[in-house]
């Protein structure tokens, strides 16, 4: 009986030792998450893009404000002088005011479209570079899957929870900043 117990214990011990290397060899899928929105806003290029867009917005706003003041001046002149002017002169000033109002509206619309286009182009360029970095990290470090964390708040994505241990965002930002500095030096 003791002999059978020793054999069973030996088999159990042998089974444990052979199972450990198998489990260690295949740890299962390696999954990570990255918040591209956060990477965009916290990266040096993202901060520079935001500053560039802010400056462009101020420039466009100044143009629109200047044009709005011109329109307001014409409007006040017409209100003050309108009753004193001859009918033909008054109608001409009214037509000019209408043209200037339309020009102001067009300028405001064009300025807004330009800002949106610039923002889209800057964001697309940075996101494209960030995605390449995520792919490189995934390949280098043997990830099976890397998901975008912030997508749920913006109407996409499905990551509801991911612990900080699998969050690669800081690593992506650091590598992107490093690559950007290296490109600037060249």
Image: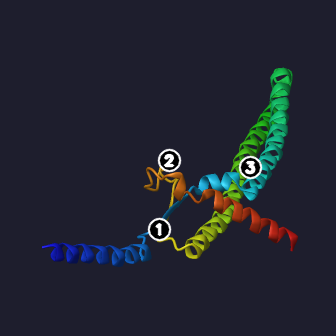
Q: Is residue 40 left or right of residue 99?
A: left
Residue at mark 1: 30
- Near mark 3 (Cα within 10 A), the count class, few <14, some 14-19 or many ≥20, is some
Tell me where residue 89 sits by quadrant: top right
Residue at mark 2: 153
- Sooner in the amino-acid sequence: mark 2 or mark 1: 1
Q: Is residue 182 left or right of residue 163?
A: right
Q: Which of labels 2 and 1 is toward the front?
A: 1
Tell me where residue 104 sits by quadrant: top right
Q: Is residue 77 left or right of residue 25?
A: right
Numbered marks: total:
3
Residue at 80% over, 23% down: 79
- Near mark 2 (Cα within 10 A), the count class, few <14, some 14-19 or many ≥20, is few
> What is the x, y in percent for residue 180?
77, 66
Q: Which of labels 3 and 1 is toward the front?
A: 1
Q: Which numbered marker is on residue 53?
A: none
Residue at 45% over, 54% down: 159
> What is the x, y in percent for residue 166?
52, 58
| Cα–Cα gap, marks 3 and 1 | 46 Å
Identify which residue, 76 or 164, lies in the foreground.
164
Residue at mark 3: 111
Position above or below: 127 against 5: above
> What is the x, y in percent for residue 171?
65, 61
- Sooner in the amino-acid sequence: mark 3 or mark 1: 1
Label 2: state its secondary structure.
Answer: loop
Specify the quadrant that holds the N terminus. Answer: bottom left
- Sooner in the amino-acid sequence: mark 3 or mark 2: 3
């Amino acid at each position: 009986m003791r002999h059978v117990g020793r054999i069973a214990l030996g088999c159990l011990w042998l089974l444990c030792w052979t199972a450990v290397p198998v489990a260690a060899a295949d740890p299962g899928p390696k999954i990570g998450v990255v918040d591209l929105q956060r990477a965009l806003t916290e990266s040096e290029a993202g901060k520079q893009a935001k500053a560039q867009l802010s400056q462009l917005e101020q420039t466009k706003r100044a143009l629109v404000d200047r044009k709005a003041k011109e329109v307001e001046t014409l409007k006040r002149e017409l209100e003050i002088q309108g009753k004193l002017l001859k009918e033909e002169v008054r109608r001409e000033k009214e037509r000019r005011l209408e043209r200037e109002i339309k020009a102001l509206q067009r300028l405001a619309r064009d300025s807004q479209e330009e800002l949106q286009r610039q923002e889209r182009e800057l964001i697309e360029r940075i996101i494209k570079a960030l995605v390449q970095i995520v792919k490189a990290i995934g390949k280098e470090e043997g990830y099976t899957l890397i998901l975008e964390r912030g997508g749920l708040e913006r109407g996409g994505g499905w990551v509801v929870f991911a612990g900080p241990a699998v969050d690669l965002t800081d690593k992506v930002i650091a590598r992107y900043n490093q690559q950007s500095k290296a490109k600037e030096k060249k």
